[in-house]
Image (tube, rainbow, N blue to C red):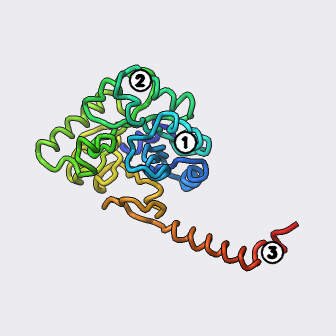
Amino acid sequence: MKITVQDFLSKKQTRQKITMITAYDYPFARIVDEAGIDVILVGDSLAMVVQGLDNTLSATMDEMIYHAKMVSRASKNSIVIGDMPYLSYQVSLEDAVRNGGRFLKEAGAQAVKLEGGREVAGQIKAMTRSEILVMAHIGLTPQALHRMGGYKVQGRTEEAAKRLMEDAKILQDSGAFSLLLEAIPAELAAAITEELTIPTIGIGAGPHCDGQVLVIHDLLGLFEGFAPRFVKKYANLKDDAIIALRQYKEEVEKGIFPGKEHSF
C-alpha cells in the first residue's frame, strides 16, 4: 500500500523512525521500494553520482523530471520527493510554483524538496497554497557551497545555531511538512527536532532526528568521490560488479560463455 504524507507525519507522533534514500532510475527505485524504505528522494545529487560532475549546481529541471518519472513509475509503496534544482525556485514565486508543480503533474512525485532558510519562506507559502507539499532543507545546503566555502558543518557557533533554530521555525510556519537537517551538530539537531511539530530528517545531523537519509550510491559502495564522515557503507557493490565483469570477460575470451544452456 502506498505510504502517504499523512503516514509520514504520524511517525513523529508515534516516535517511529523514518527511512529515506535517494534513487534516480527505475531499477534502483524498485529495489528501494521493495526494501520497504518510506521515502525515495530524487536528489539533485544525481549531478555528482550519476553524471560525474563536481557539484549539484548543473542539474536542470528537465533532467530532474526525467529521473523522477522513472522513480515514480517504479515506486509502489514509497513516497517520491523531487529535489528542486538550483535556480528552479530562487528567481521568483512563479518559477517555484511552476517548477514544483511539474514534479507532481509530469513526474508523478508526491512532494518536492528545496534548500534554504527564511529566504525561501515565500516560495514555500506559495507552493503549499498551490497544493505542492514541500520538504525544506537547512544546515549544509549544497547549492550554496560557494557562499559556505565548501562542504562544511554548519551551526557550530551560538549565533549560527540560533539562526538555524529560527529558520526551522519559520519554515514550519511557512507550511513545510518536514525539514531535512544536513551536517549540523547532533545536539542542535536534537533541539530542533524537539521544538518542531513536523518531522526532521537527518544526514550528518546525529541520531536524534525523526528519520535519516543517505545517497544510495554511498550506502551501496558505488561512488568513488568524496565520502563525508556521516556516510556508512552497507555494501561494496562496485567490487562485486568488477569481479562479475572480469569473470564474464574471462569466460568470453576462453569460449566458456555462452554454453549450451545459454544457446538455442
Residue 163 coordinates in the image, percent (x, y): 17, 38
Q: Quadrant of the C terminus?
A: bottom right
Report the residue marked by disc 1: 67
Q: Name the amino acid type tagged 3.
A: Gly
Report the residue marked by disc 2: 95
Question: Looking at the picture, does residue 154 appear above or below residue 119?
Answer: below
Report the residue marked by disc 3: 259
Question: Local crowd at mark 3 within 10 Å, few (<14), some, or many (≥20)?
Answer: few
Q: Quadrant of the N terminus?
A: top right
Residue 62 coordinates in the image, percent (x, y): 52, 34
Judging from the image, what secondary structure is the residue with disc 2 in?
helix
Instruction: Specify whether 230 is left or right of 9.
Output: left
For image coordinates 48% across by 43% down, the residue present is: 42
Residue 1 makes an appearance in the image: no
User: Mark 2 vs mark 3: which is more N-terminal?
Assistant: 2
User: Mark 2 vs mark 1: which is more N-terminal?
Assistant: 1
Residue 93 coordinates in the image, percent (x, y): 37, 21
In contact (CB < 8 Å): disc 2 and disc 3: no
